[in-house]
Amino acid sequence: MPEQTRRYQSVRREHGAAQTRQAILDTARDLFITHGYAQVTMGHIARSAGVAVKTLYASVGTKTQLLHALLAVDVADSKTTGLYDEVLRSKDLVSAVTCLAHGLRGNTERFASSIDVLYSSMASDEKARQVWDYVVAQYRQALREVAQHLVAIGVVAPHLDVDGAADRLWHCFGLPAWRSLVVDCGWSYDDAERLLTRQAVNMLEDPGPA
């Protein structure tokens, strides 16, 4: 067989495998949201995706690895928006926090289905809880980088160090903050963004003791 033909067939196989993996991830996400992570088996996912169970494991690994893959894609995607580069170019507190709030709002809204999966899975599965911890660690590290910038340019209250500023950013913009307002209280994302922005600026400017 000519070398060119073998390369073409290899590319086709890789393309087909990528399509199969994406179909599996999309199917799993829908099933997790609809039925809850704990109730969905790998057999359910395989049947809904139209693949053999063996193909499912070969493509995405275990159920926990599948969940991790779903969230890892979203975490990586959230970092490609240019959000943090723009925030780190800001020279004043209000501009930085406003930009941060708007970007985080966009990510939270865009990845709402994945966040729902996390909340439905972590209480019933220890390994799923480990995936949640991974996502939170990535999120908090990103907010810490913003806090380092705000402290470095001297726009937060003098008594706040990086840890103090980062904790306040997490309190205002962490996953629970958005969910509490939007899901639990029924607020719009616009209203939540406005409130959390004001709250963050006030907490970071607060001249009182830590």
Image (tube, grey):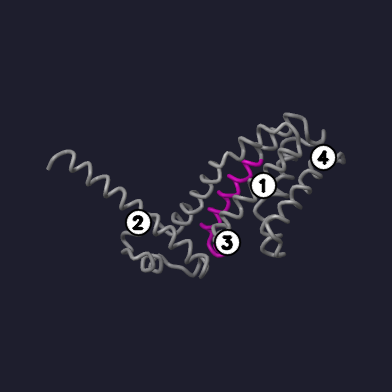
Instruction: Say left or right for 174 vs 38.
Output: right
Residue 210 is situated, as x and y percent measured from the top left of the image, at 82, 41
Q: CA distance from mark 4 to mark 3?
A: 33 Å
Name the main secondary structure of what is drawn in magenta: helix
Instruction: Please check the rendered image and state whether residue 69 is part of the magenta-colored stretch, yes or no.
Output: no
Q: From the viewer's perspective, is the residue at label 1 or at label 3 nearer?
A: 1
In the structure shown, which secondary structural element does the residue marked by tag 2 occupy? helix
Mark 1 or mark 2, which is nearer the start of the sequence? Answer: 2
State the residue at coordinates (67%, 47%): 102
Asked if the residues shown at circle 2 and circle 4 are in contact, with their CB atoms under 8 angstroms apart, the answer is no
Asked if the residues shown at circle 1 and circle 3 are in contact, with their CB atoms under 8 angstroms apart, the answer is no
Mark 3 or mark 2, which is nearer the start of the sequence? Answer: 2
Q: Which residue is mark 2?
A: 20
Mark 1 or mark 4, which is nearer the start of the sequence? Answer: 1
Category of crowding for the residue at label 1, using alpha-carbon neighbours closer than 10 angstroms: few (below 14), some (14–19), many (at least 20): some
Above or below, comparing residue 198 to residue 188 in the picture? above
Q: Front-most of 178 and 69?
A: 178
Residue 21 is situated, as x and y percent measured from the top left of the image, at 37, 55
Residue furthest to the right in view is 208
Q: Front-most of 79 and 163?
A: 79
Instruction: Say left or right for 118 vs 163.
Output: left
Q: Which residue is mark 4?
A: 205
Q: CA distance from mark 2 to mark 3?
A: 24 Å
Q: CA distance from mark 4 to mark 1?
A: 19 Å
Q: CA distance from mark 2 to mark 4?
A: 50 Å
Q: From the viewer's perspective, is the residue at label 2 or at label 1 nearer?
A: 1
Give the magenta-colored segment's residue range. Answer: 120-143
The residue under label 4 is which amino acid type? Answer: Glu
Q: Which residue is mark 3?
A: 116
Q: Where, quadrant-wise, is the N terminus in this rendering?
A: top left
Asked if the residues shown at circle 2 and circle 1 are in contact, with their CB atoms under 8 angstroms apart, the answer is no
